[in-house]
Amino acid sequence: MSLPAFGVRKPVVANLVMFAIIGAGILLGLGLRREFFPEITPNRVVVAAPYPGASPDEIERALAIKIEDRIADLRDVVEINTTVTEGSAQLIIEFADSVDIDEAVSDVKREVDALQDLPEQSERIVVDKLEPNLPAVILSIYGDTSERSLKEAALAIRDDLRALPGMADVSVDGIRTDEIRVEVRPQAMIEHGLSLPAVADRVRAAMRELPGGTVRTGTQTLSIRTVRVEEDAQLIADIVVKGEGGRVLRLSDIADVTYGFRDTDLITRLEGKPAVSLTCFQVGDTDVVKIAEMTKAYKAGMRGEPLELTIRERFAVFMQNQRNKMLESRGKPIDLSPATDRLEAYQAGQKWFGRLPGEARITTDLARFVTGRLELLTRNALQGGALVFLVLVLLLNWRVSFWVAIGLIISLAGTIAMMRMTGITLNLLTMFGLIVVIGILVDDAIVVAENIVARHEEGMSPSQAAIEGAGQVSWPVVTTVLTTVFAFLPLALIEGQIGDFLAALPVVVAVALLVSLIECLVILPSHMAHTLKATDDAEASGKVSRLARIEARFDNWRDSLYTQLIIPHYTRMHLRCMRYLYMTLATAISIVIASAAMVKGGQLEFIFFEAEDAESVNVTLRMPVGTPLAETNSIIERIERASLSQPEIASVYASVGAIGDVEGEGGDISQPHLGQLFIELNAVEERDRTSADVILAIRSELGELPGV
């Protein structure tokens, strides 16, 4: 029994298969993880070598070069990139794509541990694999308030965000490390006969916790230890540094103990006001869209803004309310927990309403690109389905059009279900594949449905027409689908990070086409047989509806249009091409040669990814080494003012004294001669000028920047 015959003779099974595919697509699709790009296997190792207080020249000579020489002879090392700054060195070692990154980390760690002539003042060298973390959304806290209050609020908000379900790593930028500073008064040291090393040793001893052995009694064994002084300025000030004549000399008697920040050259601003930022990263199997939505809900709670619930969230709240009413009627405690994760984030943020030192603002939302592509995919599916239905109505009839359009839905649902089962995520590449394949999915269904209608019009019964019509074109349809699948499959054979990047694309296309093939050979013939039988029964009974009469008149008009106008013109053109055979072949060959010449001559440019109008601009400023922070800050302020004067710019976040890697691959540097600005523009559809035009306007307003 052929597949079309099985579908026609077992319509219940065919319908069950259809509903199973659609149901699986809906249920599994709701939990499909969303992210920017497919996960890429890392092939780089990072070595962090801190050497506090040392100059870059000293670090290069005493650490960086020695580490480079040690690991340069490892197998499959492609490149070593070293960055040396004051107080630290960072090496990024790139290995060949075929290398197991965990083994590479072990090899590098073994070589680094074997180094014997490193400076005693250098700290422990850390070796780890470099896994890029892509930021999903950035929440900034800013205002005219103290640095201490901003930092305390940012750290508390970070802990809140990390505790929310579905959130991954959250980092805080723009804050300085806490420091308890002890400034000893020289006159007081001389008066009491103390030296600076002696005072330092006494403070160091008081800050250590040392074991003092054990004491055994008849009933138990007690451990004895000296308890260290807590890291509190007042407690440290009470440390006894000297005892003489029954009188104790405390640290506060000879020194000023203050609690503040490490003396680091760092200034961060948003809209010209002091600011800190919290960056939420998409790491591992987290959902980038959910991370952004949770952060936005938390921010809405902080600002006391209403939270707009989705249909699913409204349903969850309704079900929870109904359940609580039932529990209350039975005298049982009700469930007061948030009905959804977003509501939990909203309630967590509400505790900051009226207490936040400054304002909260989402300055960067990179997850919107995934959301935008999802909306594009949905729009394309709906518009494509509508256009396919319209074209088929014009060329065939509405019944065939309806079942072909249903086949598009079944194919997409089956593809989404298969993606969830195989662990493929919904990212920019897989969504691109789905958008591309939408126009191909209905091709085989059109061929099968049209041939079934043609056999029925020749006088076959609906069942026979469905079986023979689908059977006649089954192998050509299978061949057509397989050739398209094989055209995409070589993308899955590419090795390295590009291969990891593109591997999911051919899989998605292949699954979508294979599901559409099953649909058009099993499900479609069953539905076509049922539809044609219902039409024949209505005509035989003489109960032809008004809609059927309108359809019949439209079919007659369409057939006459083809037979009297389109087909004669096509026949004449075809015969003319056959008569001038060599001219036709010469024209086809000329088109091929001209196409190849355009590619070879560079007229048709090859671009891996088409550059789009940017909505985020990263400005990195480098002054001559040794430039003081104040001078760097003055240049950054000029760029800030010039940027904020442009109506297309939504926000400007400035960092003076440090630059960071926006791609999450390490390489952050802190030096007073460096600066960075993150400029957020309005959405492309909300502005007239492109980002390039805005940048040119900023450059024109700035004029000459000496020393940059």
Image (tube, rainbow, N blue to C red):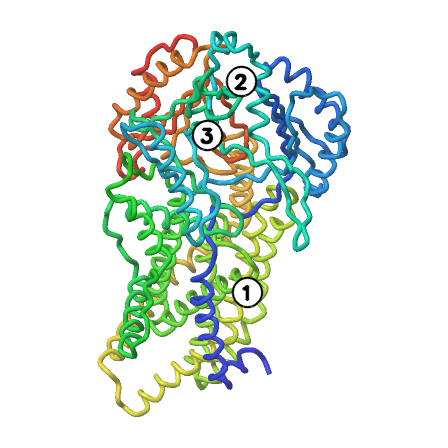
Residue 590 visible in the snapshot: yes
Q: Nearer the viewer, residue 45 or 486?
A: 45
Judge left or right: residue 72 versus residue 654: right
Q: Quadrant of the N terminus?
A: bottom right
| Whether residue 686 is situated above or below residue 309 in the rendered picture | above
Kind of residue indicated by mark 1: Leu
| Whether residue 283 is situated above or below residue 208 in the rendered picture | below
N-terminal-most mark, 2 or 1 = 2
Judge left or right: residue 301 versus residue 595: left
Q: Secondary structure at mark 1?
A: helix
Residue 634 appears in which quarter of the rendering? top left
Label 2 and label 1: CA atoms lie apart by 94 Å
Question: Circle 1 is placed at which residue position?
Answer: 514
Judge left or right: residue 489 versus residue 147: right
Kind of residue indicated by mark 3: Leu
Q: Is there a contact, CB below 8 Å, between mark 3 and mark 1?
A: no
The label nearer to you, 2 versus 1, is 2
Q: Is there a contact, CB below 8 Å, between mark 3 and mark 2?
A: no
Question: Circle 2 is placed at which residue position?
Answer: 245
Q: Nearer the viewer, residue 690 or 143?
A: 143
Question: Circle 3 is placed at which residue position?
Answer: 235
